[in-house]
Amino acid sequence: MAYKAEYIWIDGTEPTAKLRSKTKILADGAELPIWGFDGSSTNQAPGNASDCVLQPVFSCPDPVRGGNDVLVLCEVLLTDMTPHPTNTRAALRATAERYAAQEPWFGIEQEYTFFEGSRPLGFPPKGFPAPQGGYYCGVGSDEIFGRPVVEKHMQACLDAGLLISGINAEVMPGQWEFQIGPGGPLEVSDHLWMARWLLYRTAEDFGVSATLDPKPVHGDWNGAGAHTNFSTKAMRSSYDPVIAACEALGEKYMEHVHKYGFGIEARLTGLHETAPWNEFSYGVSNRGASVRIPWQVEVDKSGYIEDRRPNANCDPYLVTGAITETCCSALEGKYMA
Ligand code: ADP
Ligand code: MN
Ligand code: MN
Ligand code: MN
């Protein structure tokens, strides 16, 4: 019996990369080979030298097709087998290895918005719905739009064995969140890309689209982020390294913001539970700060921090790479776990 492998990769679309996939039929028991694609159709190669290489790096059961079928996340390589310039995962591999002894963990809150045609799901054909207030974690058909898609996506993530840790309805109608983590930087980033693909794929069957647009509706409506929760072994056992990590992020704040997703200025305005993109602040319980220390972490005097700045459309390989590099290099050798 043959099985189907859905090869998934990140393309070269600018300013924000898109997911692409295609199916390979493999003989029963056959291992996942490297494969190729037409890079001239994905902004990854010129037409006269169009071949790019797909290197399988993570696979899991395919919850959409079921049976023995699998989903296969790939890195894109050049034909000399070196990483393609759009391959941000390759750099994260090196960073993760360098700081593995500190055991960095991430948990990413992926916000997104369903659209039906050109309108967010739940918006009336003309004008606007009732202002924000009742939608967040709401219940009932006047407040909730798209729950069957969300439930099906959550189950698909579980069936695929992804590290999904929860879902909730968000502040704007049609806006939702799922969380991936906690786990290491590569693991959480791979799982997040896979969960994004499953989100688009699941919504497709319902005739709606999901978007990671960081500011899908302008005006008095919340944007969509990817709050990134972070800890190291030392932070999980004492408080000084928790503060040291916040301070380290403050010293490199501009460098980070440029890696946190296109259009960050439109979302991080200082309103709608955000801090301005060009200032840095941190504080306990403060959802208007760049980085929040959860109240329980201050009580326990150990735990994790939440970088609230990454956009919904961020590349988790870049985000977890930057946080690991900045915080782990600052903590290195200073704190015993
Ligand atoms: P919020 O209150 O900001 O909405 P969520 O409950 O949506 O928070 O998300 C919190 C995330 O933090 C989850 O993905 C969870 O896995 C992650 N997390 C919990 N503990 C840690 C930790 N020690 N290190 C890193 N991430 C963590
Ligand atoms: Mn959340
Ligand atoms: Mn949220
Ligand atoms: Mn959050």
Image (cartoon, rainbow, N blue to C red):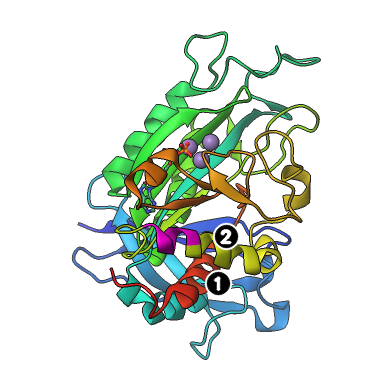
| Residue 87 percent across, percent down from the top left | 55, 73
The answer to whether the residue bearing label 2 lies less than 8 angstroms from the nearest atom of ligand 1 is no
Extreme bottom residue here? 80
Residue type beneath disc 1: Thr
Identified at 39% across, 57% down, the residue is: 239
| Residue 276 percent across, percent down from the top left | 74, 48
Identified at 55% across, 19% down, the residue is: 145
Q: Which residues are magenta?
A: 239-243
Instruction: Examine the residues drawn in magenta and state their main secondary structure.
Output: helix
Write down the quadrant of residue 253 in the picture. bottom right
Query: Label 2, on which residue?
Result: 315
The relative height of residue 36 versus residue 65 in the rendered view (above or below) is below
For label 2, the crowd category at 10 Å Cα-Cα, with few meaning under 14, some 14 to 19 and many 20 or more, is many
Identified at 77% across, 27% down, the residue is: 220
Seen in the image, is 324 located left or right of residue 56?
right
Q: Is any part of residue 216 visible from this angle?
A: yes
Query: Label 1, on which residue?
Result: 88
> Is 156 in front, or is 237?
237
> Is 154 in front, or is 110?
110
Is there a contact, CB below 8 Å, between mark 1 and mark 2?
A: yes
Seen in the image, is 209 located left or right of residue 215?
left
| Residue 173 percent across, percent down from the top left | 62, 22
Split into 4 quadrants, where in the image is the C terminus? Answer: bottom left
> Is 112 in front, or is 297?
297
Seen in the image, is 87 located left or right of residue 23?
right
Q: Is any part of residue 33 visible from this angle?
A: no
For label 1, the crowd category at 10 Å Cα-Cα, with few meaning under 14, some 14 to 19 and many 20 or more, is some
Which label's residue is closer to the chain start, 1 or 2? 1
> Is 32 in front, or is 319?
319
